[in-house]
Amino acid sequence: MKLRAALLCLSLMSGAGASAQTLPDAFTYGPVFEEFGPSAPVETATPLPADMELKVAFDISGTEERGGVNRQFETVARFMNMHARAGVARENIQPAIVVHGGAADYLLQPVPAEDASQTTRLVMALIEEGVPIYLCGQSAASHGISADDLLPGVQMSLSAMTAHAQLSRNGYSLNPF
């Protein structure tokens, strides 16, 4: 028993844990993204209405990856997949992403394009699904990033704080995770 607890603690400290490769079979992809954002179906006490509007802002600054994908960006894909799977109409699932700090590098155009990382491919898929992505202009300035360096569809904001204030005014709640 002590050995089992010690191994669990060691695996948690080493960063090992639930990743896309080690999740139980109940976690699957789709229906929005077939390569990103695995989620499990859950029977809830209160079903979600199809017309429920979910306007949620995600703040991304981290660079931690699991399985080659930034966990924070994948959270947005999971949010979209699990709510669509739970019956919320896709057009009512409206995430927005505010990026700052080291995560800004994921928003840069890869040269050549086929060298794009898994996370950059996920960012491009999110943009293709209509998810607005805002880069903190202050982070961009500190990293020497110009608007011309960004993936098509990424928008430069004065700052992350400004982007969040504007999203809040437009009815977005801030996801605390």
Image (tube, rainbow, N blue to C red):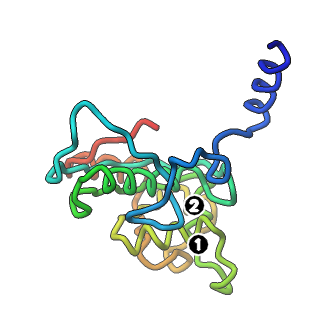
Name the residue rendered at 17%, 53% in the picture: 50
Residue beneath label 2, please?
104
Residue type highlighted by circle 1: Leu
Name the residue rendered at 61%, 55% in the picture: 70
Residue 108 numbered mark, or none: 1
Q: Is residue 107 above or below residue 73?
A: below
In the displayed image of the protein, which residue is found farthest to the front?
A: 25
* Quarter of the image with the N terminus in it: top right
In the displayed image of the protein, which residue is found farthest to the top?
A: 2
Image spot of residue 108 (x, y percent) = 58, 72
Name the residue rendered at 79%, 36% in the picture: 14
In the displayed image of the protein, which residue is found farthest to the left?
A: 51
Please state which of residues 167 and 71 is positioned toward the viewer in this rendering. 71
Residue type highlighted by circle 2: Ala
Image spot of residue 163 (x, y percent) = 36, 53
Q: Is residue 90 above or below residue 121?
A: above
